Image (cartoon, helix red, strand yellow):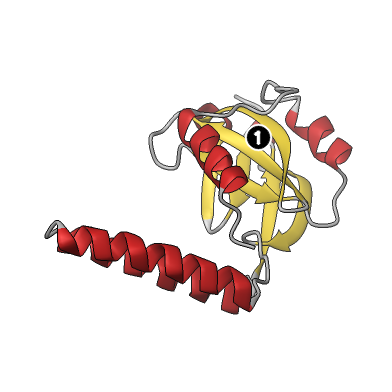
Amino acid sequence: MPDKQIFEETTLLVWEAPERIYARRGKTYFKNLFTLLGVLAAVAIFFKEFMLAGVLASFGFLQWVLSAHPPKIGSHVITNHGIKTHGHDYLWEELKEFWFAPHAGQMVLHIDTKTAYPGRLYLLLGKVAKEEITDVLRSYLPYQREAKEDLMEKISVGISRRFPLE
């Protein structure tokens, strides 16, 4: 008869952190953003691309809403079966590797998944130490010392560096 302790879930680490990165934006940021989006939307309308103009307007509205409302505090749980976060359970078999990278002044834990959606989990560390998470996760996932950047991340970082809105 198999040992029942193998199948029992034990909690290895629990921490609370905001569900997303929050950056309070000033009037200058939104003035520049809406000016840029307005010009791009006008060009799209000129070429009769009304759907693109609508997408640009939606993007501007989304930026405004996310900046106006601070994120909720969420709980992240690491167990011997996997990771529980954002209302979902991710088993170790569904996860590939992890690393840490700073973003907007906060340290973020990145975990690649084997599924197409979500392709990557982003967990803010909050007040828990990076070393504490690393010690627990190394038993289950390979650790990448350097952040992996895909093509879209390289493009977005390059654009935001060349065209700062603040």
Across and down, in percent, residue 130 comes to 84, 40
In the picture provided, is 46 more to the left or to the right than 165?
A: left
List the residue tagged with mark 1.
Answer: 4
In the picture provided, is 9 more to the left or to the right than 132?
A: left
Question: Is residue 66 something one can see in this rendering?
Answer: no
Q: Which residue lies furthest to the left in this view?
A: 48
Question: What residue lies at 11% left-to-right and 60% top-to-bottom?
Answer: 48
* Residue 46 figure quarter: bottom left
The amino acid on which the numbered mark 1 sits, given as a three-letter code, is: Lys
The C terminus lies in quadrant: bottom right
Looking at the image, is 70 positioned above or below residue 155?
below
Give the number of callouts.
1
Across and down, in percent, residue 128 comes to 85, 51
Question: What residue lies at 58% left-to-right and 31% top-to-bottom?
Answer: 92
Across and down, in percent, residue 82 comes to 61, 38
Give whichever of 48, 118 is nearer the camera: 48
* Residue 55 figure quarter: bottom left
Question: Is residue 119 something one can see in this rendering?
Answer: yes
Secondary structure under the numbered disc 1 in the rendered image: helix
Across and down, in percent, residue 100 comes to 73, 36
Give whichever of 146, 84 is nearer the camera: 146
Question: What residue lies at 65% left-to-right and 59% top-to-bottom?
Answer: 21
Looking at the image, is 82 positioned above or below residue 143?
below
Question: What residue lies at 78% left-to-right and 53% top-to-bottom?
Answer: 105
The N terminus lies in quadrant: top right
Give whichever of 1, 55 is nearer the camera: 55
Give whichever of 156, 165 is nearer the camera: 165
Q: Residues within 10 Å of mark 1 (few under 14, many from 20)?
A: few
Looking at the image, is 41 positioned above or below residue 104?
below
